[in-house]
Amino acid sequence: MIERNHVKKVITKYKVDQTALQWLRKEKVVVEVEMRSLKMAYDLLKESLQDVVLQLGFVEKKLRTTYNEIDALKQRVLKEKVTQDVLKTKVLVAKKEVHSSRMQLEALKNSSRELFLGSAAFSKMIEDKIFLAMFNKYFFN
């Protein structure tokens, strides 16, 4: 009987072990399926990450180009401001020259009027002298 009990225990244990083994095999299949799906998801994420990295590289290059353009434009603006300041200075100098030229022109106008008035008086005096000389020569000769 002891042997029989022992055989029964061994058979029972064997059946339990077989059931556990079947359950473990099923669990293994489930885990393998999950691992395959996880690997596929990982591969998809890896590809997406590579796409994102490529896009970021493109964006980074474009950003560098934009920053370079901005720096060039800043330099150009600074040069234009310097040019603007030079032109403002030239305009102020030109205005002063125009003002002094205007003053000289006014002085010339006034002197030419005086000269004209003086020459008119001088011409009148010469005419009078010629008239007197002719009058004296005609009547006293």
Image (cartoon, helix red, strand yellow):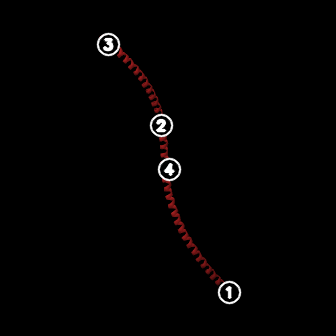
- State if disc 2 and disc 1 touch (CB < 8 Å): no
Numbered marks: total: 4
Q: Which residue is drawn at 51% across and 63% down?
A: 92
Give the amino acid at mark 1.
Phe
Q: Which of marks 4 and 2 is in front?
A: 2
Q: Quick check: 18 above or below 86? A: above
In percent of width and height, residue 31 lies at: 42, 25
Instruction: Tell me the SS state at disc 3.
Output: helix
Give the amino acid at mark 3.
Asn
Few, some or many residues within 10 Å of mark 3 (<14, 14–19, 20+): few
Left or right position of 93 against 25 = right
Give the amino acid at mark 4.
Leu
Q: Which of marks 1 and 3 is in front?
A: 3
Give the amino acid at mark 2.
Val
Q: Residue at x 48, y 43 (%)?
A: 63
Residue 8 circle label: none
Instruction: Tell me the SS state at disc 4.
Output: helix
Tell me which numbered mark, 4 or 1, is placed earlier along the sequence.
Answer: 4
Q: How far apart are marks 1 and 3 (CA)?
A: 185 Å
Q: Distance between the residues labelled 4 and 3?
A: 97 Å
Q: Name the residue under label 4.
A: 73
Looking at the image, the residue that sits furthest to the bottom is: 140
Tell me which numbered mark, 1 or 3, is placed earlier along the sequence.
Answer: 3
Q: Nearer the viewer, mark 1 or mark 2?
A: 2
Q: Name the residue under label 3.
A: 5
Instruction: Tell me the SS state at disc 2.
Output: helix
Tell me which numbered mark, 4 or 3, is placed earlier along the sequence.
Answer: 3
